[in-house]
Image (spheres, rainbow, N blue to C red):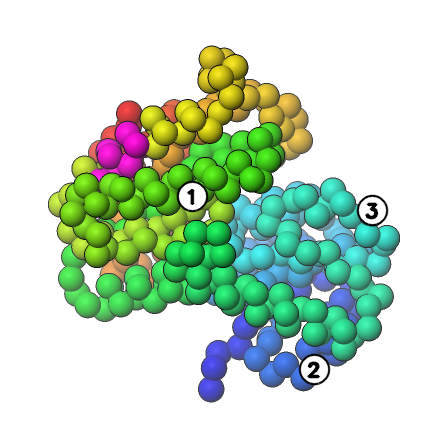
Amino acid sequence: MSKKKNIVVIDDVGDLVQLLGTAFQKYEAIGLTQVSSEVDQLNEILDVEDYMIIINEGNLNTDIRQLVEFLYSRTKYTIAPIIVATDKPFNLSDDVKKLIPVISVISKNANPQRLGHHLSNIIDSIESNRNQNALSGLPGSNVITSQLIEKVQSGKDFAMMYIDLDNFKEYNEYYGFYKGDKVILFLMKTLYDVMGECGIENDFVGHVGGDDFIMIVQNPDIVKEVGKRIISHFDKGIKSYYKEQDLKKGYIDARNRKGEIERINIMSISIIVVYADEFRTTQQGEMYKKIMLYKKQAKMVKGSVCYEANTTESSSL
């Protein structure tokens, strides 16, 4: 019997979870977990394997923008997509639609059967993307997880490199999604070029989503060299994706996560390296929390950096 896909329903009132219960009545593979918008309760409930989050916009005890920002920072490693359910006219939720990672806004006034069909189509799309990223064509988070489990169980040495861009969200909003997609494809090409240079073409590259990639390197001894080359290629190549006047300034004037205009530096890259031993001594559910902590530490370094977890060493250019 296949495992149920757990959907967390943030519903301070209770009417949404009732609607979804009716909508998903025929879908035995879907499980619903209701929770309030209180951060303490969310921290207790949210899990690395949560499949989707649906928020009841009406009568929330927490500001929805702050809530989405919290969920984004909490679940980015697993990219749990967010859907907002509203009983307001859709144009009133345009600002919510723009929040990442909100992928859809649905009406609480919809027919339950149609709503169930609509959400099941979204779930099918998510499932496809988790197996293969639509933009890059690379393996998605399901395959990445399977690869890591396989490597851990093999008992062999390996290193996982988590690759994440700094200031990509602001770039995406400033230059547009088309240019943002071009940057993602440039990053993918950079990873493969470096793999070819280092003779590790058979190692694994996956696309977690957005600007986050995973490399699994079978020979940990070359990780530092791989990291240095990725940084070198990226820092040189990323300049061609900016206008000349922005490069001369060294920044763009873009909105930060608070919606305030801020000087945003030219994109850099953070690479977090985690070795096999740490995977084997850490529970799977705790591992993503560690990676997010390491990523936060890496992003405190100005410019591009290759950060080795649980060591005193990191290299930057």
The type of residue carrying mark 3 is: Leu
> What residue did someone put label 2 on?
25
Q: Main secondary structure of the magenta part?
A: helix
Q: Residue at x 62, y 65 (%)?
A: 122
Q: Position of residue 146 (x, y in %)?
A: 34, 67
Residue 195 in view, yes or no: yes
The type of residue carrying mark 1 is: Leu
Instruction: Report the mark closest to the observer, 2 or 1.
Output: 1
Q: Residue at x 73, y 76 (%)?
A: 23
> What residue did someone put label 3 on?
92
Q: Quadrant of residue 224?
A: top left
Q: Tell me where the magenta segment starts and ends, as one range.
A: 226-233
Q: Residues within 10 Å of mark 1 (few under 14, many from 20)?
A: some
Which label is found at residue 185?
A: 1
Is there a contact, CB below 8 Å, between mark 3 and mark 2?
no
Horizontal side of 134 relative to 253 (left or right) equals left
